[in-house]
Amino acid sequence: EAATLNTLNGQAPLVIAHRGASGYLPEHTLAGYELAVKLGADYIEPDLQLTKDGYLVAMHDTTLNRTTNVAAVLGKRNNSYAVSGYTLAEIKQLTVLPTGTGKTTYPGFTPSSPDAMRVPTFDEVIALAQTQSALTGRTVGIYPEAKIADPLMEDKILSTLAGFGYGKASDKVVIQSFSLDTLTSLRAKQNSLGMTIQEVFLGNSAAGSFTDLAKIVNGIGPSITNNGANAVTAAYIEAAHAAGLMVHGYTFAQANPDLAAAQYDKYFGWGMDGVFTNYTDLGVTARNEL
Ligand code: G3P
Ligand code: CA
């Protein structure tokens, strides 16, 4: 018998594939996003950076050198590996490295795309979600993060989403940022474009009360590893819900299935509405047992 769910909307919590299936395959690759879908992710999460020629690419860092072979292939630009110093055509020459896990394959999985280990554009990530939605018969959501505070990035995110037919709060799209200024600007731009895509503010220390935040965003994305002020507790989630904010915690990075299960159970019991996880399958298993 299903237990009562304490989420804001009473629905099962969402499993968000943090940087793709990043516990198994290189982060922010088409291979990693596709594997995440195969493992049951509700949403795939691309962090976004802007290239020199104004394209949105999926990458966590503002620089290319941690996650790609840029040093060997292209070298530095203006004494830096900044994403903003290279064109998309140049970045497409690079291979994403297995930073973190060291693994480039996953048992029984072959990526569909021949470019599965290149740096993807935002367009390619959305296209993958839409293709996989058609193939699987369930809608794969996208959860982009604006990693830099730049009006051009805001405009490109919204125009790209609109180009793929997204624009409503009911679409499986959530935009996230650590910058309340960026989210405020995005909300204003959405209003002027007639768009109502959901937004989430990341960070434990809310810039103001939950009630004030709820005027701008639909949810909050706190770090679950913060044990200090504003640590995520049952009371924290209850207060966010009372203000009408959903809570999507990051990062569920526990690889051990038993330890992971206990961790998910704790936060799901408190009514957490979604989890950013590196191990999609472990999040899905815990969620499906609720
Ligand atoms: O989006 C939640 C989480 O992704 C924020 O952490 O640094 O992995 O982007 P980060
Ligand atoms: Ca992120």
Image (spheres, rainbow, N blue to C red):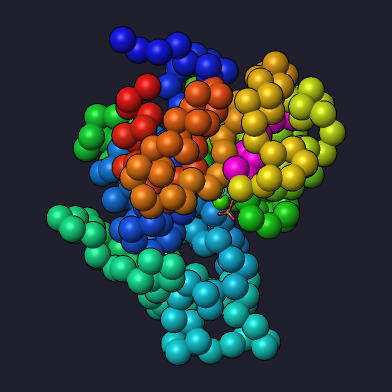
Q: Residue 145: within the magenta?
A: no
* Region in magenta: 216-224
Image spot of residue 9 (x, y percent): 53, 15
**Between 242 and 26, which is closer to the camera in this rendering?**
242
**Between 231 and 183, which is closer to the camera in this rendering?**
231
Q: Residue 217: within the magenta?
A: yes
Quadrant the C terminus occupies: top left
The residue positioned 54% from the left and 23% from the top of the image is 271
**Between 213 and 23, which is closer to the camera in this rendering?**
23
Task: Count the labels in the image.
Answer: 0
Image spot of residue 25 (x, y percent): 34, 61
Image spot of residue 124 (x, y percent): 39, 54
The residue positioned 69% from the left and 28% from the top of the image is 236
Question: What is the magenta segment's predominant secondary structure?
Answer: loop
Residue positioned most to the right: 208
Q: Is residue 204 above or below residue 109?
A: above
The residue positioned 73% from the left and 25% from the top of the image is 214
**Between 156 and 118, which is closer to the camera in this rendering?**
118
Q: In the displayed structure, does residue 6 sit left or right of residue 36?
A: right
The residue positioned 50% from the left and 23% from the top of the image is 269
Image spot of residue 237 (x, y percent): 64, 26
Q: Is residue 182 above or below residue 83?
A: above
